[in-house]
Amino acid sequence: MADDLFADQEPPASVTPGDGPLAERLRPKTLSDVVGQEHLTGPDGAIGRMVAAGQLSSIILWGPPGTGKTTIARLLAEAVGLRFAPLSAVFSGVADLKKAFADAEKMAAAGRRTLLFVDEIHRFNRAQQDGFLPFVERGTVVLVGATTENPSFALNAALLSRAQVLVLHRLGETALGTLIERAEAEIGQRLPVTAEARAALIASADGDGRFLLNQVETLFSVTIERPLDPGELAQFLHRRMPVYDKDRDGHYNLISALHKAMRGSDSQASLYWLARMLVAGEEPLYVLRRITRFASEDIGLADPQALVQCLAAKDAYQFLGSPEGELAIVQACLYCATAPKSNAAYMAQKAAWRAARDTGSLAPPANILNAPTKLMKDLGYGAGYAYDHDAPEGFSGANYWPDEMKPLDLYRPVDRGFEKRIAERMAWWDERRREGRGG
């Protein structure tokens, strides 16, 4: 068993209490040491060009946790000779901002500019974000903000117009492998895992370099008699939970991916994105609501059973609960992904709503109005109404549009699935109407 491998829990000689956290010891010393962000830090990248020119503009670094935002900000200040002043929006308030700006103004008067780094900048409210503007405009500070949230939603437009948004990528296998190699060089020994476990360790980091180094440090902190295989590694370490905020950017990105995969009839990808959301802790009924909407928006009458499947899945989930009921959500997802697609009902709704707004209060034609009183009969309500069930083939071909309005072509069924049959019926009825009106 894996537990037998960790008898000696004392730190090896290569790791001493005074060394500090491994992630801090391995923090890059120059921008060229930063891994995984070469599209920004390389010679042709936005940051590389700024450093080469010796001119730094205000920027917003947007990327997942553990991708180097803080490190890049610190190294930028060093590269262009600016004073580095860090703030965290989680722990700072208005008083801290005022002090930071006052200190920056004093330094500016002494001839030295300040790079103000604001971590989690999206946590400042709109008014606080506005407070940055005059100091950024005057050049008192060069603002470098870091955020894990989409700046389009998290930051106000005025601040975005004064800063360049740079996107950091989650670290790939190569970049994470490089971090492990650097850790091994720092510690002076190989990581005590098999090649397969090493790959599993990299995958478990989910693109977060800081998390990976913390896991590596944990492995180095004990004496392991023989390299761990993937199963033993899983018992020893905790897997990183996926980055996912139910009310933020990750939430909307994944539900968009699920919707697009179902629309593209890729059942395998649809199931993957569904799993990503549910495994990350998304509310199952929220996902099912979106799938139900999809059944009407993207399938409609091409397969009327899609909506039935979704509503049945809701009943099943509410009856069974989690995790058993989640299989019903999987069934609804796969049904929708594999069903024939049509947005004809969705487009018809938009066209009908638009026509209703444009035509105002036009009255129905008198022949299809009820006449419960003598006055209404005298006014012609219901006069000439043709009862379709009495007509040949159950179809009268009467006019049902306002007299002042030409009939509109709102619903256009596609030539797929059940809607193909609907289109044939509609074509037959249209032909009968033309015959009744003399062609």
Image: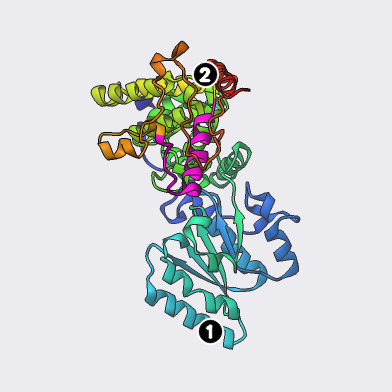
- On screen, residue 251 above or below 230: below
| Marks 1/2: CA–CA distance | 72 Å
Is 145 in the magenta? no
Could you tell me residue 356's position as x and y percent? 46, 44
Give the residue at mark 2.
422
113 or 362: nearer the viewer: 362
> Which stretch did the figure color magenta?
342-366
Could you tell me residue 428's position as x and y percent? 56, 16
- Residue 177, label in figure: none
Tag 2's secondary structure? Answer: helix
376 or 162: nearer the viewer: 376
- Label 1 amino acid? Glu
Residue at 63% from the left image edge and 22% from the top image edge: 439
- Residue 105, label in figure: 1
Tag 1's secondary structure? Answer: helix
- Label 2 amino acid? Ile
Quarter location, residue 276:
top left
Q: Which callout, 1 or 2, points to the residue nearer the camera?
A: 2
Q: Earlier in the sequence, mark 1 or mark 2?
A: 1
Query: Would you say 8 lies left or right of 119 here?
Result: left
* Any part of residue 229 in sight: no
